[in-house]
Amino acid sequence: MIFTLYDLAGWAMFAWLLMIFLPSWRVTRWLARSAVFPIWICVLYTIGIAVVLRDTGPGIMQDFGNREGVLRILARTDVALVAWIHILAFDQFAGLWIYRDNLRHRYVPVVVQSGLLLLTLMLGPLGLLTYWLIRVARRAPRLAGGWIERVVGSSDPFPDAAELTSGDNEPATTPAPVIDAPFGPAQWADVDDRIATMPSPVQSPLRYALHVFGHAERALTFVGLLGIALAAGVWTVSLVQGPVIEPEGVLSKPIAFDMAVGIYMLTLTLLVPLARFPRRTLFWWRTTAVILTPIGLAIETVQSLRGIDPRFSQVAGPIDNVIGNVFLTFAIGMIVLFWILAVRFFDLRRPGTERMLAAGVRYAFIAGFLAHAAGVVMSTVAQGRAMGASGNWIVLHGLGFHGLQAIPMVAILVARSALAPDRAMRYIHTAGLAWTFACLMIAIQTFRGLSVFVPTFTSIAGALLLLVWLGLLLTAAARGMRTQATGRLA
């Protein structure tokens, strides 16, 4: 009986496929309005739980009160399958809510909606959380419209051209933003002066980077370079003293950590000016990052040189345990800073080529969220990098964070080409989705306890998606070079 219910619940995949691949079809919309499939699964679950309670008695419910009891009852085949139908029901409702809510309010484009639905299908709560964060970011200007008006002079800092006229068809007082000179409009008078004079990151990416590192964000640049310098220093120590310091200091870990944090901070440093924080918000964000980053680098480096694992030590004393809690605070703080920065990019609408760059950055932040999720899994559930026989969460951790460089790079190259705006945005969406889904394939492969080098459907699909990204990068670079040669910039 339970096996039949399980097979019948599988028909709900039809609804997922329609919502993901045919979101605008009238049949899909009718199924979403009627909620046929979630109700169908709920009916199957009701039958299944009734069968389980008939066979085991209601006393089984008390086992849900402790960890051992949950493990014991889930070891039963019938209970495990009914529990899976339980999960399918709530995943369906979560996906249905995302589909209906976004089609009503359009917080994200439909193509991004499909990606979020796929994420919800694979990793239900993570997809729901991602959409909820985007939704909060998009709703924030409306919920705090008065505050934003006081800060930037308009509830929409980048109004569309049609919105720049008042109701009686007379020009509005707010001037149109300057395309590709994004840091000059009067409504951004509250932005830090060091950012207001910045060159365009699309038209002059090298000048932009030099201006950010050398003038606008020296403090953030310093902490990024500090991580790289510490990595070089620990590497030198490992050459002299050896790769291991007893009892548990493995020097390859602080080398990788310090280098990764340094590159990560330098990448965020390039994105901070594009977030266009109000002056006060920028001050607190910058100050918090400058304080937290050296603390995390110092704990990772010093504890490893002392022979102590800063995260999962088996020999730590009371003081080392306190230091470990401080390190956890650093990690949580960095995630919060990442979310605050991401919200700005999902919040503001951008003009011209900056709109293309912002689209790429949004996908980059989604990949970054997946990287942070892998970090949380390593720090809490897995208590390390390993998963199963040969899985390693560090691959997803690194691939997600490298999306912060890889996807905006495509966006910049596309924005500098002569492609029509609509076609250019398709390039960016395709590159962003390819990288994001590659991360998801790696996540599934790792969750199964397999190395990414073990040939399976997920590992091969992940590799092909990365090749799609690479092909788009090379195509955009070639088009950009042709555009430069002919003197035509989009």
Image (cartoon, rainbow, N blue to C red):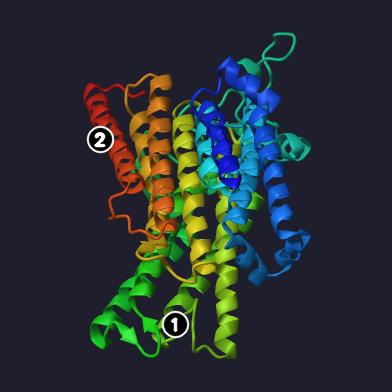
Residue 14 locus on image (x, y percent): 53, 29
Residue sitting at x 26%, y 27%? 479
Residue sitting at x 56%, y 19%? 24
Alpha-carbon span between mark 2 and mark 1: 42 Å
Residue carrying label 1: 302
Residue 198 locus on image (x, y percent): 46, 42
User: Is disc 2 in contact with disc 1, using a CB cutoff of under 8 Å?
Assistant: no
Q: Label 2: few (<14), some or many (≥20) within 10 Å? A: few
**196 sits left or right of 166 in the view:** left
**388 sits left or right of 64 in the view:** left
Q: Is residue 431 visible?
A: yes
**Residue 366 vs residue 196, the one in the foreground:** 366
Residue type at mark 1 is Val
Residue sitting at x 35%, y 87%? 245
Question: Which image quadrant: the N terminus?
Answer: top right
Which of the 4 image quadrants contains residue 56? Answer: bottom right
**99 sits left or right of 482 in the view:** right
SS at badge 1: helix
**Residue 108 vs residue 36, the one in the foreground:** 36
Residue 193 locus on image (x, y percent): 55, 46
What number is the disc on residue 474? Answer: 2
Answer above or below: position of 199 versus 299.
above
**Residue 330 vs residue 62, the one in the foreground:** 62
**Residue 98 vs residue 68, the one in the foreground:** 68
Total residue callouts: 2
Which one is earlier in the sequence, the residue at label 2 or at label 1? 1
What number is the disc on residue 354? Answer: none
Residue type at mark 2 is Leu
Answer above or below: position of 54 versus 11.
below
Residue 167 locus on image (x, y percent): 74, 12
Q: Label 1: few (<14), some or many (≥20) within 10 Å? A: some
